[in-house]
Each structure stands twice: as C-alpha cells, then as structure tokens.
Image (tube, rainbow, N blue to C red):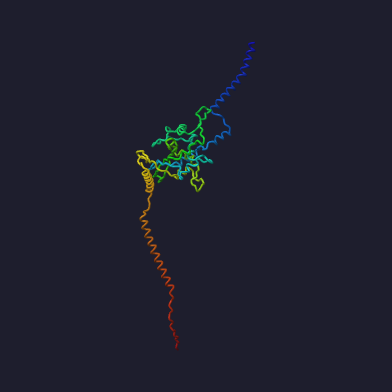
Amino acid sequence: MKRIYYIVACLLAFTLLPAQAQEENENTRTTQQQRKGPRASRGERAVTKEESGLPELTVRAQDLNERLTQQIGNARWMRVVYRQVDLTKEQNAPLYYPVRPMNGQMNLFTILFQLLSEGKLKVYEYLDGYEVFDDEHLVNFKELLDRFHIYYEEVPDERGGEPALVINESDIPSEQVQNFYIKEVWYFDQNNSLFDVKTLAICPLMTVDNDFGLTTSPMFWVPYENIRPYVSTSYIMTSNLNNVMTFTIDDYFRRRMFEGDIIKTQNLLNQPLQAYCPTPDSLKKEQERIEKQLVSFEDSLWMKPDTTTQVVNSKEAKKAKKQAEKEAKAESKKETTVKTKAPKAQKSTPVRSVRRRR
C-alpha cells in the first residue's frame, strides 16, 4: 500500500508542477505588461500619432537650428532692447490670427501652449528685470494652469505615474494673449563686418478682465532658439491684398516684419523707460531717441561719399551742359543762315580767240 501511495503522489506532483509554472509565467507576463503599459495595435498607434499637432524634432532639424543660430560671442558692440508688440495692430496681426486652430493653422501662442503641454518645450519664470534660463527657474505646467485659471482635466495614469492633463482647444486662452514682450540684441561683429539684430526670447502677456479692470500679466519666457524649428514650418498670411502664405513665423521674426515699441534697454541701473519718463510725451521722445541712436550707429559704420562735393560737381556739370547747349544752338543757327543764302552769280568775261600767225 505504501508503494501505491508513493506512485500516486509522484503522478500528482508531475501533473501539478507544469500547471503552476504556466500560471507563474502568465503572472510575470501580466506584470511586465502593466509596467510597460497597455499594448496598442497599429491602428491605435496611428491615431495617437495623428493627435499630436506638432511634429517631433528630428536630428536634421536640430542641426539646421544650430546652423541658423546667430553667434554674438565675437561682437564688439551690442545693445539689448526690450519691445512690446501689440497683436491688435494690423502689422502684428499675423501672430494673432487665427485665434482658434483652423485648417491646420495656429497662431503663435497656440503653438507655444501645445508644445508646452506635450513636454516638447521648456519655459522659464518671468522675473521683472532678471531673466535666467536654467533648471532652477523652469515653469511647472500644472502650476502655470492654476495660476492663470486655465481649465484642465486630470486623467489617471494606468502605470501609476503622474496623471495626464487634458485641455480642450476652446480652453486655450489664445484670444486673451494680445501682447508679447520681445527681447532682442543689436550687435556688430567686427571679425565678419556684420551688423544685425537677433531675437533672444519672447514672453506672452495674458489680459484678464477682473474686478480691477483689464490687467495684463506676463506668463513666461521662452528662448527663441528653442521654438525656431517648430515655427519655421508654420506659414502665415502677411498681407490683406495677397492671401498667399509665403512667409513663416521664423521669417516674420528674422526679417523684423513686426512693429513694437521700446519699453526698456539694458542699463546699469536696470530701469525701464517708464521709471525716468513719467509722461507719455517724454516716453515717446525717449523711444524715438533710442531708435535714432541704433540707426545712426549703423550709418556711422560705413564710409559714405561727401554730399557737398557731389552738390558742387552737379552744379558745375549743369552749367557746363547749359553752355554746351547754347554753343550748339549758335553753331546750328550759323549753318542754317549759310545754307539759306543764295550764291552770287559770277560775271563772265569774253574770251578772245588768238590765231596763230605763220
């Protein structure tokens, strides 16, 4: 009997061990799938890829962005200027319209907001008179939404990570962003004999209607070099007469097609123009003075011909031309008078015939 019990126990052990091993394998597979996340089919992957409105930054785009970056390390002269660009003006309207995405077109703030929500862009805190673009001053996207009261929905992550933030297109406050701060530098590179303007960073300003009226508050700073690869493929319409979209947002900034008022220049006291220009008239005069300084510095770099000698030479040339015309007219009159006079008839003298005598 002991042998029979021993044989039955061995048979049960051989039958139960493969079943337990199979269950353990299935458990390990399920845990691995939970760690990696749910497996999506080809159709689901295609849908999630199409949902992202902006393309991923390729290596080729990064290389092109580095080559287009203007190097200002060798500049012997530079001046940092802050401008406020009003998007309600007709000259700056291409950065504001369309307010809502339409036919694949988006305005500048919508592009920035979508890049920020997808984690493709880093933005930095706005500190009055102090811009530092490092990891300590990075802006948290959720805190930004809470600060400016932008509606969002938290979707829990199946992997147990941080919940995803879902924002509808209608909740993106693109129509409330009607102004931008633009930080640019005017520089002269003596090694390359180049005088140019470079856009350093931009800052959107959000206008909110509250109990105190209309208040405008800056949102964040973003270096322009970080958004150039994305806006270089976003075409905009720049004219009401010609509706063909031939320029991109990058062209709009590089060609300086916008119109902005100077609000500050980098100085030792770090003061804006309003600190020492209390009245609107004095502020306007100071803005015009700074604009003239920038233009005059560029004009002073290149040698121009003396305009006084050109004026004297032009006057002498005019006198000589008039004198030559008078002489030509006098000669032509003489020739016409000579031609009109008839020639005098000469008197004929009789010819005597002389005979030869032998």
In the image, is residue 343 above or below residue 356? above
Position of the C terminus, as image quadrant, is: bottom left
Residue 356 percent across, percent down from the top left: 45, 87
Nearest the viewer among 304 and 190 is 304
Tell me which corner region of the image, top left, top right, bottom left or bottom right, holds residue 80.
top left
Tell me which corner region of the image, top left, top right, bottom left or bottom right, holds residue 340.
bottom left
**Residue furthest toward the front?**
211
Position of the N terminus, as image quadrant, is: top right
User: Count of labels shown?
Assistant: 0
Residue pictured at 57% horizontal, 31% vertical: 40
Residue 345 percent across, percent down from the top left: 44, 79
Residue pictured at 39% horizontal, 63% vertical: 322
Residue 205 percent across, percent down from the top left: 44, 38
Tell me which corner region of the image, top left, top right, bottom left or bottom right, holds residue 286.
top left
Residue 134 percent across, percent down from the top left: 42, 34
Residue pictured at 41% horizontal, 67% vertical: 329
> Left or right: where does residue 53 sit relative to residue 74?
right
> Left or right: where does residue 60 sit relative to residue 300?
right
**Residue furthest toward the top?**
1
Nearest the viewer among 2 and 355 is 2
